[in-house]
């Protein structure tokens, strides 16, 4: 399989897709003509790590790692090593701005797990944290059938038959910055990991900033109190190009006929 490579240059056309609508609306990223500097995030950033240090983005080349792992640097200094002219780290910065409490908690959990298991042995918890951090999609739902349909891979039921309900009883919020990176050059097969978050109906009527603040608090509680990322079991496959509004080609219902991408649920033989 050919290794994915994002566009080499910063170009607005790479972030024109529907999946980037929140970034365009909240950060005006489509008004940029070149790669943003780390200081670009400062007006949007209000994050404090578990060490009570303010989070800031620092040029990766200027960070003294001193044999520390990436997450340890963030925990001990508050500095997030950020590679310049890099889509992955650019999108990672947006997620820190949108989910500051959750990102700080995930950072703390990584450091705690490293203290327990070292860097060579990755625990199930740390694997789940990483998978969600890279590929997670928060699905805010106010009706329980969405979980049933999507976990059961009833793709046409969720994406076609009930398409008009997206934004009313279900809404997607990207968490995984690797998802964003790969959506700069979308391809059939691109799949994220959905985590369902129960919300009241009225949350869908709130402004976008309020929605993110609410979800950040809920995610923080789910991870810290409910231990929802103890392992990968609560993460469900989500074909990203099937999400209504995220990919123009899915306006045609026949798009979902590709069962190599929209795979039926594998049934366990008894």
Image (cartoon, helix red, strand yellow):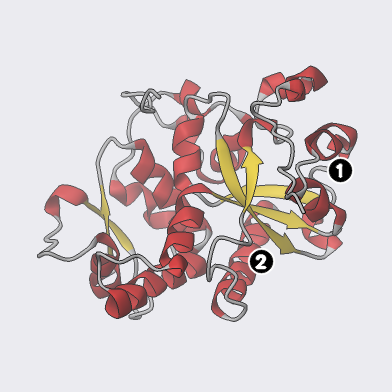
Toward the front, the furthest residue is 270
Query: Residue 66, how many percent across, how many down?
Result: 9, 65
Rendered residue at 55%/26% (across/down): 16
**Between tags 2 and 1, which lies in front?**
1
Which type of secondary structure does the marked residue at label 2 adopt? helix
Rendered residue at 76%/47% (across/down): 150
Name the image quarter holding residue 37: top left
Name the image quarter holding residue 103: bottom left
Query: Residue 94, how many percent across, how many down?
Result: 45, 50
- In the displayed structure, does residue 152 sit left or right of residue 215? right
Query: Residue 245, how many percent across, how many down?
Result: 71, 32
Query: Residue 180, how many percent across, how many down?
Result: 49, 39
The residue singled out by tag 1 in the image is 165
- In the displayed structure, does residue 184 sit left or right of residue 82? right
Q: Is residue 158 above or below residue 8?
A: below
Most foreground residue, 197 or 93: 197
Disc ID at residue 142? none
- What quarter of the picture does the C terminus occupy? bottom right
Q: Residues within 10 Å of mark 2 (few under 14, many from 20)?
A: some
Which type of secondary structure does the marked residue at label 1 adopt? helix
Q: Residues within 10 Å of mark 1 (few under 14, many from 20)?
A: some
- In this figure, what is the number of numbered marks? 2
Rendered residue at 85%/60% (across/down): 201
Disc ID at residue 214? 2
- In the displayed structure, does residue 142 sit left or right of residue 228? right
C-alpha span from label 2 to label 1: 20 Å
Q: Is residue 207 above or below residue 55?
A: above
Q: Is residue 216 above or below residue 22?
A: below
- Marks 2 and 1, the one that precedes in the sequence: 1
Could one spot residue 189 in this view of the protein?
yes
């Amino acid at each position: 399989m050919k290794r994915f490579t994002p566009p080499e240059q910063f170009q607005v056309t790479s972030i024109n897709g529907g999946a980037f609508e929140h970034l365009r609306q909240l950060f005006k990223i489509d008004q940029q003509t070149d790669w943003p500097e780390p200081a670009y995030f400062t007006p949007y950033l209000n994050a404090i790590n578990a060490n009570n240090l303010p989070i800031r983005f620092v040029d990766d080349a200027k960070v003294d790692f001193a044999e520390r792992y990436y997450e340890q640097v963030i925990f001990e200094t508050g500095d997030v090593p950020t590679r310049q002219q890099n889509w992955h780290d650019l999108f990672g910065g947006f997620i820190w701005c949108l989910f500051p409490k959750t990102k700080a908690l995930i950072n703390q959990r990584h450091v705690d797990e490293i203290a327990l298991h070292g860097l060579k042995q990755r625990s199930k918890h740390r694997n789940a944290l990483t998978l969600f951090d890279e590929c997670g999609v928060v699905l805010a739902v106010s009706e329980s059938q969405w979980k049933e349909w999507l976990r059961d891979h009833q793709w046409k039921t969720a994406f076609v038959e009930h398409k008009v309900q997206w934004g009313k009883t279900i809404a997607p919020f990207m968490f995984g910055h690797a998802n964003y990176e790969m959506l700069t050059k979308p391809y059939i097969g691109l799949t994220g990991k959905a985590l369902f978050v129960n919300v009241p109906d009225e949350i869908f009527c709130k402004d976008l900033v309020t929605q993110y603040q609410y979800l950040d608090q809920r995610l923080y509680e789910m991870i810290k109190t409910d231990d929802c990322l103890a392992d990968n079991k609560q993460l469900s496959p989500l074909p990203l190009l099937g999400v209504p509004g995220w990919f123009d080609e899915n306006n045609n219902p026949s798009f979902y006929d590709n069962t190599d991408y929209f795979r039926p649920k594998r049934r366990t033989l008894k």
